[in-house]
Amino acid sequence: MKRPHSTPSAVSPYITPEGHRRMYEELTFLWKVRRPQVTQAVAEAAAMGDRSENAEYIYGKKQLRQIDSRMRFLSKRLDELVVVDRIPEDTSRIFFGAWVGLEDSEGNTYAYRIVGRDEFDPDKGFISIDSPMAKALLRKTEGDEVVVNRPNGTSAFTVLSVRY
C-alpha cells in the first residue's frame, strides 16, 4: 500500500551541512542559554509566594514547556537527518543541494536551491526537496523543459543553469 506524502516516513531525511549546523546551534542555544535563563526566572517568580496567581511564574512555566518541546523535536530530528556533504558525480544534473536557474514562459527568471524540508526558506530561494517544483527538477539538465503541477495549474520552466 502506498503511503501518502504527508506521513513523516515519506519525507526526505536530507539536509545540507549548513542546515544541520543551524539546527544544532539552535538546540545548543536552547539548552545552554535560553532554558537556564527561563529556569532562573521561574525560580525567582516561585520565591515570591503564591504561584497560582503569579503571572511571571505561570508564563515562565509555559515558556519552559515550549523550550522543552522544541528541544525534543530538534534532538529527535537531528538523529533522523542525513547530512549531504558531497556534490554528485554528475554535476550537470539537478540533485539535492543544487542551485538552479530557471526561466518561465514570460521570460521571468528564478533561482532556487534544493534543500531539506527543515531548511526551506522562500526568501532565500531555498525550496524543499519534497516540493512539487523540486520533484519536477530532479535529474534535469540545462536546457530541459520542466512542467510543474501547482495549486493554480501547471507552469512550464526552462532550466538555465545548474551549480553546486
Image (cartoon, rainbow, N blue to C red):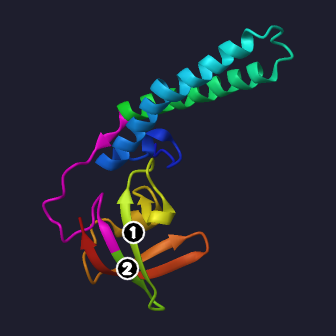
The reply to whether the C-beta atoms of the residues labelled 1 and 2 are less than 8 Å apart is: yes
**What residue do we see at 66% from left, 13% from top?**
43
**What residue do we see at 18% from left, 52% from top?**
86
Q: Residues within 10 Å of mark 2 (few under 14, many from 20)?
A: many
For mark 2, what is the residue?
102
- In the rendered image, which quarter contains the C terminus? bottom left
Q: Viewer-proximal residue, 131 or 55? A: 55
**What residue do we see at 44% from left, 61% from top?**
127
Q: Quadrant of residue 24?
A: top left
Left or right, 139 with respect to 64, comes to left
- Number of numbered labels in the structure image: 2
The magenta-colored residue range is: 80-100
Which structural element holds mark 1? strand
Where is residue 51? Give x, y as percent: 80, 12
Where is residue 151? Give x, y as percent: 60, 69
Q: Earlier in the sequence, mark 1 or mark 2?
A: 2
Q: Viewer-proximal residue, 102 or 35? A: 35
For mark 1, what is the residue?
112
Where is residue 142? Give x, y as percent: 25, 79
Gap in angstroms between the C-alphas marked 1 and 2: 8 Å
The label number, if any, that marks residue 81 in the structure image: none
Question: Three-letter amino acid code at disc 2?
Answer: Leu
Question: Three-letter amino acid code at disc 1?
Answer: Tyr
Residue 13 in sight here: no
User: In the displayed image of the protein, which residue is found farthest to the right?
Assistant: 53
Q: Quadrant of residue 68?
A: top right
The kind of secondary structure the magenta stretch mainly shows is: loop
